[in-house]
Structure formats: structure tokens, C-alpha cells
Image (cartoon, helix red, strand yellow):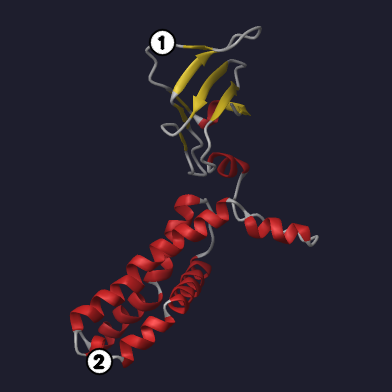
Amino acid sequence: MTIAGFEVVFYTLSFVVPGFILYSVIVSIVPRKTEEKELSLLRYLILSCVNYAVWSWLIYLLFKLEFFTQHPVRSALAWSLIIFLSPVVLGLLFGKLSSIDWSRKILTRFGLVPIHPIPTAWDYLFSKTEPVWLLVTMKDGSQVAGFFGGKSFASSDMSERDLYIQEVYKVIHDGPWQKIPNNKGILIKGEEIKHVEFWKD
């Protein structure tokens, strides 16, 4: 590898990878709007800088202390912590804060209405972790009732909004729903759904 090629790899690893890891962890918790590649690269760079700001004290010690400068293995472990492990932890923290929408709540108290980062109501509702009861009305007028819990799944793909409901119930309009015995759930294609109703326990 040439010196120029090594520099490209070094700068990519240093200033893009931490931000990419951090952002990937965030969107695995809270879906985000798709954006242009240029904006994505800028976001990765900014998040990488945030990651380095958190560890600025350790980075300083890595260059100054003989403990690190004379022990390359320890130095490599410290850099691995900063570049690979730290973004995962920060991503989990930022993702959790985003899921409770704390910044939006603060801004609305001051009369500001920021654009919501989650792209659709579908993503917003199904990104929440608490289990709910669903009544899915199909385009042909039929209905499917069920329990949407930890084993259920709602697609986050914009082009395919399918639903997997882990427990299916028979709708009794004048009484409680009846669980269908020996049922392993149901998969519903998004194109067949008219609307979905939600209930908590």
C-alpha cells in the first residue's frame, strides 16, 4: 500500500468509522429519514468529532504518557475502545434519549415545533418497545386482531410495510377476543392494510 493509500485508510478509519457506527446504532433503535450521501458523510464526521470530544482526555494521555507511548499493545487497545466500542455505547445512549423524545419536549415548552426525525407515523408507533393489542382492518373489510409483543415485527422498509403479529385472536364484537388455539402468528402484507387500531393492557 502506498503512503497516500495508507493516509486515506487512516483518515477514513479515524473520522468516518466512529460516526458511522454511532449513527448505525441510533437508527437501529429509532428509525430516521433517509438523506443524501453528502449529508450522511457530514453527519458521520460530526458524530465522530462528538465521540472524540468525549474521549479527548484519553487521547491527550495517549500522546503524552509513557505508559502508552512505550506500550503499543495498550495504546492499540485504547484506540480500539475510542474508535469501535465507544460509538456503540454512545449510540445506545443517544438512541434511548431519542426514543423518549426529550429534546422535542423541551423545545415545545418554549413554543418551538421542530421537525420530527422519525420519517413516518408507522415507524414512530412500531419503534416503541411496549407491547400493544392491534386490530388490523384490511382493504376488503375483514379484520385481524392480535397481540403485538416482543416476538412480533413491523417492517421498517418504506417500500414494504408488512406486519407479523405473534398471537392472533378472533374478533368478538359483543365480548372479549378469543385466542385462536395452536396459532403461530400471522404475516400481513402492507399493501392489504387499510388501517390499524392500537390498545394497551
* Amino acid type of the residue tagged 2 in the rendering: Glu
Return the mark for residue 17.
none
Q: Position of residue 24 (x, y in %)?
A: 43, 59
Q: Residues within 10 Å of mark 2 (few under 14, many from 20)?
A: few
What residue is shown at x 25% (from left), y 91% (from top)? 66
**Residue found farthest to the right:** 111
Q: Position of residue 190 (x, y in %)?
A: 52, 31
Q: Residues within 10 Å of mark 1 (few under 14, many from 20)?
A: few
Q: Is residue 191 left or right of residue 102?
A: left
Q: Position of residue 95 (x, y in %)?
A: 50, 56
Q: Secondary structure at mark 1?
A: loop
What residue is shown at x 71% (from left), y 60% (from top)? 106
What residue is shown at x 40% (from left), y 77% (from top)? 15
Q: Which residue is mark 1?
A: 181
Inspect this view and state whether residue 137 appears. yes
Q: Quadrant of the N terminus?
A: bottom left
* Amino acid type of the residue tagged 1 in the rendering: Pro
Q: Nearer the viewer, residue 172 or 73?
A: 73
The relative height of residue 30 versus residue 89 in the rendered view (above or below) is above
Badge count: 2
Q: Is residue 129 left or right of residue 103?
A: left
The relative height of residue 158 versus residue 33 in the rendered view (above or below) is above
User: Which label's residue is closer to the chain start, 2 or 1?
Assistant: 2
Q: Which residue is mark 2?
A: 66
Q: Is residue 152 left or right of residue 141?
A: left
Estimate the spatial distance between the alpha carbons at disc 2 and disc 1, rounded to whole Å.
Answer: 68 Å
Residue 142 sits in which quadrant? top right
Q: Nearer the viewer, residue 27 or 179?
A: 179
Marks 2, 1: nearer the viewer = 2
